[in-house]
Amino acid sequence: MWRALASNALTFLVVATFLLGGLILWGQSQYKAEGPLDTAICLRVKGGSNMNKVSRDLEDQGAISSATIFRMAADYTDKSQQLKAGSFLIPEGASMAEIIDEVTRSGASTCGTEVEYRIGVTRTQTRVRELDPATLNFVEVASFVVGEDEVPEVYQEKRNQADTRYRVSLAEGVTSWQVVEGLKAVDALTGEVSEIPPEGMLAPDSYEISPGDERTALLQKMQDRQQERIARVWETRQDGLPLSSPEEMLILASIIEKETGIPEERGQVASVFVNRLKQGMKLQTDPTVIYGVTKGQGTLGRGLRRSELRRNTPWNTYLIDGLPPTPIANPGLASLQAAVAPDETDFVFFVADGTGGHTFAKTLQEHNRNVAKWREIEAERNNSGN
């Protein structure tokens, strides 16, 4: 009898072990298999949450087949206590293993809300955007001009969410004074700025920030990035350029930046100024004269007066020879590259063409015809009220 009982117990143990092994193998396959999600989602994990709550949220949204397996796998891999707060992009078909890795890896949000402070030449704009998981494109939900528009409630609401991401973006061609003034209006930053950085030494780019970051620390990051760009681009310069130093390259790049907003024109504009420098001609460019009037503090907001064109300032390139003593704005990478690799042309003149671009000329006679056409366009616009 005892022998029979022992035999039955052994049989039961073998069957149980077999079933348990099969269950474990099945669970492992479910853990690593492609998930049921057919459209990407943005999973928000609040501070103080746990794997139980996350597993239920994922199951409710159809991202996993079993909350139980998800929790057990997180425990088995010792990742339950590594859960991070944030907003995480869960792509379609993501496995449980991939999801657990995403929510425990770094804590850096990969979707959700982004607040961007864009510092431009004329204004600082704040945009609140949400990432659409289905298209992976940001959708703007609010936008306002700092100091002019009423602050929308959604901005304050998103500012109070711990997983909201922030960035500061500098437009190409902003002056250092404009950057500092813009940063003063960014309420996510802290600290005073006692000194305006040298003109041209702030890299137009996008910078991720965190609430409470110091303004001076961000300005230093901008200067470090611009210095790295200057050094790297200077090493790629063409032979025979009338530029003797990286500083002169930076000055020329800033003029190119202010003369055209059309990427395809940068090489041609650069060629005009390089040709003029080689021939000993004055640069005769309005943006430098404007800088002599404003010193980069705001915009002129009107056309130049004849008295200003005759005013003797270090930046009046109608009067001085060669380059002005300093940059007139912070040029972007493309303008730096154009300064050291201009198009090969014989152009020494250019004028607006009425479409936002310019018409280029090799001779004064040709240039005068182009100027006459531009004046006709201006007259027609003035007469029509445009």
Image: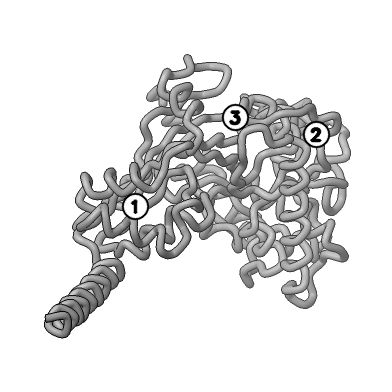
Could you tell which of marks 3 and 2 lies nearer the N-terminus? Answer: 3
Q: In the rendering, at what x and y percent does residue 212 appear? A: 67, 32
Residue 15 appears in view: no
Q: Looking at the rendered structure, which numbered label has been put on residue 292?
A: 2
Q: Could you tell me how far apart the alpha carbons at marks 1 and 3 are, in whole angstroms?
A: 30 Å
- Please give the name of the residue rendered at 26% of the width and 54% of the height, measured from the top-left corner: 68
Between 28 and 216, the residue placed more toward the observer is 28
Mark 1 in CB contact with mark 2 (< 8 angstroms): no
Looking at the picture, does residue 6 appear above or below residue 297?
Answer: below
Q: In the rendering, at what x and y percent does residue 3 appear? A: 16, 85
Q: Secondary structure at mark 1?
A: loop
- Please give the name of the residue rendered at 54% of the width and 39% of the height, measured from the top-left corner: 166
Q: Could you tell me how far apart the alpha carbons at marks 1 and 2 are, in whole angstroms?
A: 45 Å
Q: Along the horizontal axis of the image, is 317 left or right of 5?
A: right
Looking at the picture, does residue 274 appear above or below residue 300?
Answer: below
Nearer to us of marks 1 and 3 is 1
Q: Amino acid at mark 2?
A: Gly
Q: Which residue is mark 1?
A: 136
Please tell me how crowded label 1 is: few (under 14), some (14-19), or many (20+) other residues with Cα within 10 Å.
few
Q: In the rendering, at what x and y percent does residue 100 appear? A: 39, 58
